[in-house]
């Protein structure tokens, strides 16, 4: 029985804890002290903990063989979706809603170009998808 079975509960619990912490007077100062440069270390630790299960489930000794098995149409489709469709779709949506706020518009376009790798890995693991294919495509898009 893994943690993923209760993922919805964990997410709701995390939201409740976050909302409760936000009500504590002076919590902003405490959270600011947890920063190292521009990185909030609490967030960084949370991201690493979220990424560990999907990465731990991959059999890396078979990884090189699995990369060569990625169908070219899937790799090409992933590249097109991540680097053509995503940024232009987000750019279009951003222009329609944020045309006067250039900083926010730029951020929306960057989000459209840079998918959340952590969530791709987590959702693939939850769906019991092909972890080799997922990690291969994540590495391909990260390299690009």
Image (spheres, rainbow, N blue to C red):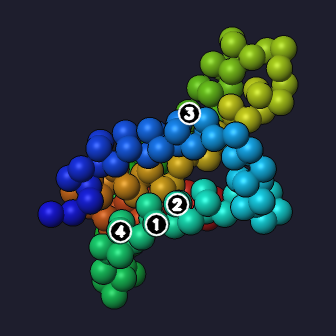
Report how far apart the C-alphas of labels 1 and 4 lie in the structure.
8 Å
Can you tell which of label 2 and label 3 is closer to the viewer? Answer: 2
* Front in this rendered view, residue 143 or 107: 107
| Residue found at x 84% / y 14% | 100
Residue 49, disc: 1
Depth check, mark 1 against mark 4: the one in front is: 1
Name the residue at the front extreme: 25
**Label 2 element class:** helix
Indicate the quadrant where residue 103 lies: top right
Mark 2 touches mark 1? (CB < 8 Å) = yes
Q: Are marks 3 and 4 in contact (CB under 8 Å)?
A: no
Position of residue 94 measured from the top left corner of the image (x, y, whole percent)? 69, 21
Secondary structure category for the residue under label 3: helix
Q: Residues within 10 Å of mark 1 (few under 14, many from 20)?
A: few
Q: Are marks 1 and 4 in contact (CB under 8 Å)?
A: no
As drawn, the label of residue 66 is none
Above or below, 68 against 39 in this view is: below
Residue 72 shows in this picture: no
Disc 4 vs disc 2: which is toward the camera?
2
Q: Answer above or below: position of 28 versus 105.
A: below
Nearer the observer, 96 or 17: 17
* Residue 85, numbered circle: 3
- Which residue is label 2 attached to? 46
The numbered mark, 3 or 4, whose residue comes first in the sequence reads: 4
Q: Residue at x 15, y 63 (%)?
A: 1
Q: Quadrant of the C terminus?
A: bottom right
Find residue 12 and report its horizontal and vertical position in percent. 37, 39
Quadrant location of residue 112? top right
Circle on res. 53: 4
Q: CA distance from mark 1 to mark 3?
A: 30 Å
**At x 48% / y 56%, what residue is drawn?**
118
**Mark 1 or 3, which is nearer the eye?**
1
């Amino acid at each position: 029985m893994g943690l993923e079975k209760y993922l919805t509960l964990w997410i709701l619990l995390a939201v409740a804890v976050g909302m409760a912490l936000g009500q504590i007077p002076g919590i902003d100062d405490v959270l600011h002290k947890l920063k190292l440069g521009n990185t909030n270390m609490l967030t960084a630790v949370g991201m690493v903990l979220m990424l560990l299960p999907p990465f731990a489930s991959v059999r890396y000794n078979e990884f090189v063989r699995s990369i060569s098995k990625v169908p070219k149409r899937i790799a090409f489709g992933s590249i097109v979706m991540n680097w053509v469709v995503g940024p232009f779709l987000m750019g279009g949506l951003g222009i329609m809603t944020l045309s006067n706020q250039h900083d926010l518009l730029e951020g929306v376009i960057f989000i459209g170009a840079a998918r959340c790798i952590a969530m791709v890995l987590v959702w693939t693991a939850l769906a019991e998808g092909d972890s080799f294919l997922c990690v291969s495509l994540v590495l391909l898009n990260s390299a690009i």
